[in-house]
Amino acid sequence: MNDFILKQPKDSFFRKQFESLSCENICCDYENEDPLFEDEYKVTPFLIHRYKNRVLLLTTKFCSAYCRHCFRKSILPQLKTPQFDDYLEAAKYVREHLEVEEILFSGGDPLILLPEELLEVLKLFNFKNRFLKFRICTRVPVVNPYLVSEKMLSIFDSFGNGRVRFSIQINHSDELTSEFRDIVKRIRKRGYEVLSQTVLLRGINDSLEVLEKLYVDFFEMGISPYYLFQGDLAKKTKCYRTSIKDSLDLFNALKKKLPESYLPVFALDLPNGGGKVPVREPYFLGMDKSYAFFKNSEDIEKESNKKAVKKIDLNKIKHKGKSIENKFDGKIYKYPIE
Ligand code: SF4
């Protein structure tokens, strides 16, 4: 925990996200150190190309604070520190792949770099005659707001309008400190969009009241609701994760409470590198007692000109003695229900 987090009240839901629980010792067989299979999609040592139109750069190997639910806390220490040549190699790849439209500067956290260091990295991806969008994936404005200086924000101005967006993980209204609110105002005043990414966390934000307040707060602050994520199947994180069934019930209840414009997309990352999908049709196929079943985006796209994928009627399947897995063509991803 850094000094800013240590300043927060001991019982705040902000601080609790950084305290490890004894149940962290439990590891389930479906959990993985690299639950998104990022290693498989690495095209250079620090660049991940999982989706056709965007890439993710591991800009640093450090975060300003390490969230207990996140898989990166155990992966990052294994990385070497990226050097200028590593950024150059990543930029060369992007230059040669014209299908890439957006770069996610993630990490670790890109905003722990010095402004001049980050500017040097961004400049490598500023190609002539090509409009690449930059998404700054960060938690620094929440966990260490004093690092977000005017000098830091000004470096983004040199890349023109409509190009830079900030994607910030915020899980509870306790994180909306006066320091963070001030940063959001300054970012928005400069013309950049702020997107929220929220992870559903057991005992932190898994209640309707907490989520409702959070999304009302986002609306009032001008933060776009973007994704509400089911926790990743990261190693030793079961005690921080909500069950998929509870998460779905919660999200359905939230939909009844808030206008559509306040709502995020409820999504998850499929096991075995299946990628990110919204938890809804046509990706979400149904559940049985042990698993929720999904198809991934690529397969759905392939099938779009073939038969429509319908939601499973579990009773009918049981009656016919068929399992969910042989009901559909193509690959089915199983997400454990517990
Ligand atoms: S959620 Fe972000 S800030 Fe937290 S450990 Fe993961 S990468 Fe670092």
Image (tube, rainbow, N blue to C red):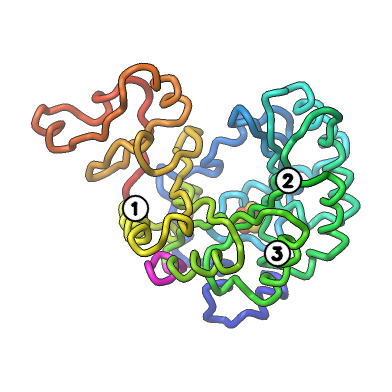
- Residue at disc 3, secondary structure: helix
C-alpha distance separating marks 1 and 2: 33 Å
C-alpha distance separating marks 3 and 1: 29 Å
Q: Dividing the image into four quarters, tell me where ligand 1 lies.
A: bottom right
Q: Residue at x 60, y 67 (%)?
A: 221
Q: Nearer the viewer, mark 3 or mark 2?
A: 2
Which one is earlier in the sequence, the residue at label 1 or at label 2? Answer: 2
Which one is earlier in the sequence, the residue at label 3 or at label 1? Answer: 3
Q: In this rendering, is residue 337 above or below 301? A: below
- Picture quadrant where residue 184 is located: bottom right
Q: Residue at x 45, y 46 (%)?
A: 267
C-alpha distance separating marks 3 and 2: 20 Å
Q: Residues within 10 Å of mark 3 (few under 14, many from 20)?
A: many
Out of 61 and 143, give the one closest to the viewer: 143
- Residue at disc 2, secondary structure: loop
Label drawn at residue 141: 3
Residue underneath mark 1: 248
Q: Quadrant of the N terminus?
A: bottom right
What kind of residue is marked 1? Leu
